[in-house]
Image (cartoon, rainbow, N blue to C red):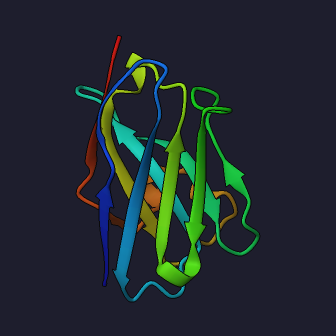
Protein backbone atom coordinates (compact mmCIF):
# COMPACT_ATOMS: atom_id res chain seq x y z
CA UNK A 1 0.00 0.00 0.00
CA UNK A 2 1.21 3.48 -0.88
CA UNK A 3 -0.01 6.71 0.64
CA UNK A 4 0.43 9.98 -1.23
CA UNK A 5 -0.10 13.41 0.26
CA UNK A 6 -0.05 16.55 -1.85
CA UNK A 7 0.60 20.05 -0.60
CA UNK A 8 1.41 23.50 -1.93
CA UNK A 9 -1.78 24.44 -3.71
CA UNK A 10 -3.45 27.80 -3.33
CA UNK A 11 -4.64 30.96 -5.03
CA UNK A 12 -2.26 32.77 -7.37
CA UNK A 13 -2.58 35.49 -9.97
CA UNK A 14 -2.06 34.77 -13.62
CA UNK A 15 1.64 34.79 -14.43
CA UNK A 16 2.56 33.63 -10.96
CA UNK A 17 4.19 30.42 -9.75
CA UNK A 18 3.43 27.59 -7.36
CA UNK A 19 5.38 24.54 -6.29
CA UNK A 20 3.44 21.42 -5.40
CA UNK A 21 4.90 18.63 -3.30
CA UNK A 22 3.84 15.02 -2.96
CA UNK A 23 5.14 12.99 -0.05
CA UNK A 24 4.93 9.22 -0.44
CA UNK A 25 4.93 6.61 2.30
CA UNK A 26 4.43 2.87 2.51
CA UNK A 27 5.62 0.30 -0.05
CA UNK A 28 6.92 2.68 -2.70
CA UNK A 29 9.41 0.21 -4.20
CA UNK A 30 9.24 -0.49 -7.02
CA UNK A 31 7.74 2.60 -8.59
CA UNK A 32 7.97 2.77 -12.36
CA UNK A 33 6.54 6.22 -12.93
CA UNK A 34 5.35 9.22 -10.97
CA UNK A 35 2.93 11.74 -12.32
CA UNK A 36 0.94 14.85 -11.67
CA UNK A 37 -2.56 15.09 -13.06
CA UNK A 38 -5.30 17.67 -12.77
CA UNK A 39 -9.03 17.66 -12.92
CA UNK A 40 -11.21 20.69 -13.45
CA UNK A 41 -14.96 20.63 -12.76
CA UNK A 42 -16.81 18.74 -15.47
CA UNK A 43 -13.61 17.52 -17.10
CA UNK A 44 -11.68 14.27 -17.11
CA UNK A 45 -8.46 13.87 -15.20
CA UNK A 46 -5.50 14.70 -17.44
CA UNK A 47 -1.83 14.06 -16.92
CA UNK A 48 0.28 17.22 -16.84
CA UNK A 49 3.70 15.79 -15.97
CA UNK A 50 5.31 12.37 -15.79
CA UNK A 51 8.73 11.12 -14.76
CA UNK A 52 9.78 7.53 -15.38
CA UNK A 53 12.08 6.22 -12.68
CA UNK A 54 14.31 3.88 -14.73
CA UNK A 55 15.61 6.59 -17.04
CA UNK A 56 14.40 9.84 -15.43
CA UNK A 57 12.71 10.90 -18.65
CA UNK A 58 9.96 13.48 -18.32
CA UNK A 59 6.82 14.00 -20.36
CA UNK A 60 4.48 16.98 -20.62
CA UNK A 61 1.45 17.76 -22.74
CA UNK A 62 1.68 20.79 -24.99
CA UNK A 63 -0.67 22.74 -22.71
CA UNK A 64 1.97 22.97 -19.96
CA UNK A 65 5.25 22.31 -21.77
CA UNK A 66 7.80 24.97 -20.93
CA UNK A 67 5.84 26.12 -17.88
CA UNK A 68 5.64 23.03 -15.64
CA UNK A 69 8.57 20.98 -14.37
CA UNK A 70 8.38 17.66 -12.55
CA UNK A 71 11.22 16.53 -10.32
CA UNK A 72 11.75 14.02 -7.56
CA UNK A 73 13.90 13.43 -4.53
CA UNK A 74 14.27 9.69 -4.22
CA UNK A 75 15.86 9.91 -0.77
CA UNK A 76 12.83 11.81 0.56
CA UNK A 77 10.27 9.83 -1.46
CA UNK A 78 8.91 13.14 -2.66
CA UNK A 79 7.91 14.37 -6.10
CA UNK A 80 7.47 18.02 -7.00
CA UNK A 81 5.69 20.06 -9.63
CA UNK A 82 7.03 23.53 -10.31
CA UNK A 83 4.41 25.57 -12.12
CA UNK A 84 5.42 28.89 -13.67
CA UNK A 85 3.56 31.45 -15.76
CA UNK A 86 0.27 30.08 -14.51
CA UNK A 87 -2.89 30.73 -16.49
CA UNK A 88 -6.55 30.77 -15.41
CA UNK A 89 -7.09 27.57 -17.42
CA UNK A 90 -4.63 25.82 -15.09
CA UNK A 91 -7.24 26.06 -12.31
CA UNK A 92 -8.00 22.53 -11.12
CA UNK A 93 -7.43 20.01 -8.38
CA UNK A 94 -3.94 18.58 -8.80
CA UNK A 95 -3.19 14.96 -7.93
CA UNK A 96 -0.01 13.01 -7.51
CA UNK A 97 0.10 9.44 -8.84
CA UNK A 98 2.44 6.46 -8.62
CA UNK A 99 2.63 3.49 -10.95
CA UNK A 100 3.86 0.55 -8.87
CA UNK A 101 2.84 -2.41 -11.00
CA UNK A 102 4.65 -3.13 -14.22
CA UNK A 103 2.43 -3.05 -17.28
CA UNK A 104 2.82 -5.32 -20.25
CA UNK A 105 3.30 -2.56 -22.81
CA UNK A 106 5.50 0.47 -23.22
CA UNK A 107 4.07 3.92 -22.80
CA UNK A 108 1.63 2.96 -20.05
CA UNK A 109 2.94 5.86 -17.98
CA UNK A 110 1.22 8.23 -20.41
CA UNK A 111 -2.28 7.14 -19.30
CA UNK A 112 -3.86 8.32 -16.05
CA UNK A 113 -5.80 5.04 -15.70
CA UNK A 114 -2.52 3.12 -15.52
CA UNK A 115 -1.50 4.61 -12.19
CA UNK A 116 -2.06 2.48 -9.10
CA UNK A 117 -2.23 5.13 -6.41
CA UNK A 118 -3.44 8.72 -6.30
CA UNK A 119 -3.41 11.26 -3.52
CA UNK A 120 -6.38 13.28 -2.32
CA UNK A 121 -5.42 16.31 -4.36
CA UNK A 122 -4.65 19.96 -3.76
CA UNK A 123 -6.60 22.87 -5.21
CA UNK A 124 -4.87 25.32 -7.51
CA UNK A 125 -6.78 28.46 -8.46
CA UNK A 126 -5.37 31.00 -10.89
CA UNK A 127 -7.10 34.36 -11.03
CA UNK A 128 -7.04 36.57 -14.09
Q: Quadrant of the C terminus?
A: top left
Left or right: 100 in relation to 123: right
Q: Is residue 51 above or below residue 60?
A: below
Q: Please name whichever residue, 43 or 91, is drawn nearer the observer in this view of the structure.
A: 91
Residue 72, horizontal then vertical, whole percent: 57, 66
Residue drawn at x 41%, y 51% as measured from the top left:
20
Left or right: 27 in relation to 40: right
Q: How many labels, in total? A: 0
Residue 18, horizontal then vertical, whole percent: 43, 40
Residue drawn at x 41%, y 58% as measured from the top left:
21
Q: Is residue 59 visible in this depiction of the protein? A: yes
Q: Please name whichever residue, 57 or 7, is drawn nearer the observer in this view of the structure.
A: 7
Residue drawn at x 53%, y 45% as measured from the top left:
82
Q: Quadrant of the N terminus?
A: bottom left
Left or right: 67 in relation to 42: right
Residue 113, horizontal then vertical, whole percent: 42, 55
Q: Is residue 108 visible in this depiction of the protein? A: no
Residue 52, horizontal then vertical, whole percent: 65, 65
Q: Is residue 120 above or below residue 16?
A: below
Residue drawn at x 55%, y 83% as measured from the top left:
75
Q: Is residue 88 above or below residue 53?
A: above
Q: Please name whichever residue, 116 or 58, is drawn nearer the observer in this view of the structure.
A: 58
Left or right: 10 in relation to 54: left
Amino acid sequence: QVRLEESGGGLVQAGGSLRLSCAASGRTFPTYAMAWARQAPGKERELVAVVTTWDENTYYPDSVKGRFTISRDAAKNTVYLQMDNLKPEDTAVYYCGFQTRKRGYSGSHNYADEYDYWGQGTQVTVSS
